[in-house]
Image: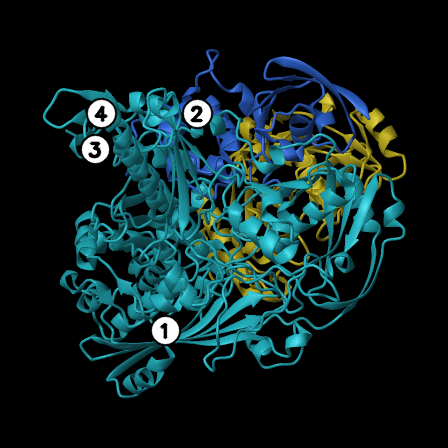
Amino acid sequence: MPKDSGIGTSPKRREDVRFLTGNGKYTDDINLTGQSHAVFARSDVAHGKINNIDISVAENMPGVLAIFTGEDFADVGGNPAGWLINSRDGEPMKEPKRPVLAHGKVRHVGDAYAAVVAETASQAQDAVDAIIADITEFPAVVDMETALAGGGFVHDEIGTNQCFDWGWIEDNRAATDAAIKSAPHVTTLSLVNNRVVPNAIETRASIADYDRGTGDYILYTTSQNPHLTRLLISAFVLGIPENKLRVVSPDVGGGFGSKIYHYGEEALVLAAAKKLCRPVKWTASRSESFLTDAHGRDHVTKIELACEKDGTFIAFRTDTMANVGAYLSNFSTVTPTFLHGTLMAGNYTVPNVYVNVKAVFTNTAPVDAYRGAGRPEATYSLERVIDKCARELSLDPIELRRKNFIKPDQFPYASAAGLEYDTGNYDALFDKLEEIVDFGGFNARRAASEKNGKLRGLGINSYIEACGIAPSNLVGILGARVGLYDAATVRVNATGNISVMVGAHSHGQGHATAFPQVVSDMLGVDENSIEIVHGDTSKIPFGMGSYGSRSLAVCGSAVVRATEKIINKARKIAAHMLEASEGDIDFKDGKFSVTGTDKSLAFGEVAFKAYVPHDYPHDELEPGLEETAFYDPANFTYPSGAYACEVEVDPDTGQVTVESFTAVDDFGNVINPMIVTGQVHGGIGQGIGQALLENCTYDESGQLLSASYMDYAMPRASDLPFYNVDHSCAMPCTHNPLGVKGCGEAGAIGSPPTIVNAVVDALHSGGHTHVTHIDMPVSPVRVWSAINN
Amino acid sequence: MYNFEFVKPSNVADALAALASEEAQALGGGQTLIPTMKQRLASPEKLVSLLGISEMQGVDVSGNIVTIGGATTHANVAAADAFSGLTGLASGIGDPAVRNRGTIGGSLANNDPAACYPAAALATGATIVTNSREILADDYFQGMFTTALKEVEIITAVRIPVPLASNYQKFEQPASRFALVGVFVAKYVDGVRVAITGASENGVFRWSEAEAALSVNFSYDAISSLSVDASDMISDLHGTKEYRANLVRVLTGRAVLSAS
Amino acid sequence: MQNISIKINGKSVSGSVEGRTLLVEFLRNDLNLTGTHVGCDTSQCGACTIHVNGVAVKSCTMFAAEADGFSVDTIEGQENADGSLNKIQQAFQDHHGLQCGFCTPGMVMSAADLLKNNSTPTEAEIRTHLDGNICRCTGYHNIVKAIMAASGQDVSAIAAE
């Protein structure tokens, strides 16, 4: 009989009711008594020397309470990069200071050099307009190749625009070079992984409050990981003791990576709140978001695929420039390296892989992890070059992939890029894809399109990602400055209901609904009696938040461990209550019973006893029923998938429309299929957005041309189709207790190459065989220009 | 946004009086002006809303003339369904919420080079009726964001002769959903008019070669070998000059097919 | 400052606003109706969509003073009289038509605007109608499906749970 609750079922999301009735509580919805408002003065040039900032007029304007400049933060710490990357020659990466407010130089358009706090936001804006900034503009460093060639430096003190020159795996370089040199066939492709702006629909916002009596701070902020934000502020930037700083991230309106990071605005409102002894609030306009949120992707890559004439892969070699922007954002150094290079073997038994990444400072906004983070870049490069190779060798693109797949009996598999894949079955995914998609009818559909003057293309794609970020011992060796465990506390209250405090943060992922399904299954209690608490450092154990498809695989595992501890303790209490030995106590379906007898106790009775221990063996048992567990994963998890789509191209206008999209993913076990499906939908939507629409572009002077929704094309409902999503081919993760792998990023990883492969296929069918590649976004003008050379 | 005084007169005379003061500006639906003011790129001291003027509201079809009040929203123009080209154009501007606020007078007064209404007005040879005079569309549009309107002059109505056949084709700029190129084709007894928006550095324009060809032979084939000079076209993130020139031809052809 | 009176969700409210006060600011800051959100400054994301005199409007692109004497409906007034979710809200929950929830109030208000004039919209009509509402989480699949379901259409053939 199918289950009607718990793991594997799809209860409606309980958080939906408040969102659907306007009762969500997002940061900007919070207003504190006596609050003042901060507005930032931002550079309108990409690169310049700050000679003087004259605030004499501004500070006397109505309502102005305080004005801050970079000088005020000259002595506090910089906002650090979370990973130390060493170059091929062993030199550590260049790590220039990222100040709270620009000091000495401005380094990108939007770089804040001053902030005004006033009674109202309008007054603060008026005063910002009255600040006279004497800035000598320097030529901007925008293009990565130019940046590496020297000339102007974004950071003069480091004397280079190269942050690092990373090789992976350096010891494999010579063998890879040799293999490519002697290979019977080499396919080469140069491509750009286009820069995108994350664009969570809720812009960043922060409110700080300071209690003069206790010296305690509270920061309400739009964060995916309140503890990480607190750690960065406390340990690196402002030095506020962690136990004097409470960080609350309430309902958060999407993150996609951009809200992982600590930003200077958070430090500013905290410092201002202390100075003024008043709450200080700041909410970004969308324009500010475009200019200052960490952007995503922005790789320029040359990839070579060497193979036998029959398509057997011999080697992959890539040469990438990765833009890190003007400052190193917190995850900016790991994203193009360990989250990218380690995935460059894909799902394949290729023996030689070598990845070179040069990270480049430019006078643009910082670039960091965006949904998928490094893995989409790896997948895109690989799967585009494989598609090109198939065409060159006249091989079926599915057959070429299947020929090189790691086979089920080869797991665990040590990839040539340094990871150990625990489990997977890539052929099964393609079997399922071929079952779902009517490949046989494609030619008829193509003919129908052609009758209407359109070209039809079929794109297929395969991906693997490393999720469940991440084993602390491994990431420590690789340069991480934090551990990447997570934590959960399960508190069984006296009346039997349960609070679960988690380090993960839900900003759309549905933890409030899915986590209780796990606990409910384990304890045999109604999932509606279980509440999830997240997003407040004063309430939850120290966890690392949500990103990298890690919430369930890492934090969910901590929930399982803490719940196991609850069961173990409750068993002891039950043994006492039933006057039996612990070893004779069975726990099943929410009942403790003595083996072989009809004596039993409900879970709630045991919970009550824990808190009303009138008759209790205090020498053996503590009162209370609350347990905490920290969980550090043993390995990454490795979701994988097989994707297909069909596009129509209008050759007269270059317009591409997505006619169908099918995603077959292996996420291991699935707790809530409805939520998992929704996550895949969202990832595909973002991936199609990157592939067809989104284009973050700076001009030569470093002005952001796509700085609003007037020029940055967000995918709308009318740009996208219904998606066909399947995750029935589950190969459970072998090393976490739930056997889960993570699903949040898959769609964004798997979809861009699927789309571009389909567009190229369509153009070839129309005789435009000179078109071997079009860079994303595959916009109408690019397609039309490619067709018309 | 800078502060201003908001007034909402109920007749044209009061509106003109209010607009006579220094730094006063008329406010239609505000769908362009309000975002501009948020960026502090406009700073009127007084905003004079025209939406309370009942005589400037509504769509009237009498004989072969459609008269649209200057403060009529796009949604109301679409709902009136006066003729297919106009209905199609009005129902495709922006999005539904924008269409419920934006007005034909506001659009024509602003004359954004990528707006839709200028194409309709120019292709139909409309008459722009103001509080003080009537201006033929051919005289009204004077380059991007520039019109024949004087200070303190309000578009009270637009008079459009109903064409025998018409169609508007818009290729949307994917972000703003304004026209990357928009083509309005209108066929009258005495000839065909073709107006192009979104494409030219000089704002909306008539494509006279296409008009001549279509006036002789109103068919796709008549214009399929024509081309516009790419050198005057706009080049930006979303389209090169050559691409826009191509779209002008392609969309004109499609408009003719749809109108036929 | 000028005084305005608006009927909001059926109740008359009065307030004093500056000329520049946007309707959404009046709702959020003066009336604490924070369910209407702001996601952009160019009138495109639609998170601020409400109904003014019965039609959908972006409350970030209308001054509060312009609404003087008008009737305004926001997400806070959409539930059924007994406090239960209305059919659109319920369909969004049933079909997982929301994730982070930030665009959701605007989506619900836009959907209501559509269904008022078109009781059984097609998929294409729904997608086109949502041109002014941006969602970054859902890929729109379940939003479109929810609106079809809310209009009484059978959505069982549309893929997924």
Q: Which mark is residue A770?
A: 1
Chain B pictured colour? yellow
Please tell me if label 1 and label 4 are on a single chain.
yes
Label 3, residues with CA under 10 Å away: few <14, some 14-19, many ≥20? some
Chain A pictured colour? cyan
Q: Nearer the viewer, mark 3 or mark 2?
A: 3
The residue depicted at 17 percent of the width and 49 percent of the height is A435
List the residue tagged with mark 4. A591
Please tell me if label 4 and label 2 are on a single chain.
no
Give x and y (percent) for residue A519.
31, 34
Compared across the picture, whether B5 is left or right of A235 comes to right
Of B188 and A518, which appears nearest the observer? A518
Badge 1 vs badge 3, beta-carbon distance below 8 Å: no
Badge 3 vs badge 2, beta-carbon distance below 8 Å: no
Give x and y (percent) for residue B76.
59, 28
Of B145 and B37, which appears nearest the observer? B37
Compared across the picture, whether B180 is left or right of A581 comes to right
Find the distance from the CA under tag 1 to the CA under tag 4. 70 Å
The residue depicted at 48 percent of the width and 36 percent of the height is C130
When the figure is inspected, residue A386 is found, relative to residue B111, above or below; the finding is below
List the residue tagged with mark 2. C89
Q: Nearer the viewer, mark 4 or mark 2?
A: 4
Label 1, residues with CA under 10 Å away: few <14, some 14-19, many ≥20? few
List the residue tagged with mark 3. A582
Q: Residue A648 lies in what quarter of the image?
A: bottom left
Find the distance from the CA under tag 1 to the CA under tag 2. 50 Å
Give x and y (percent) for residue A34.
74, 32
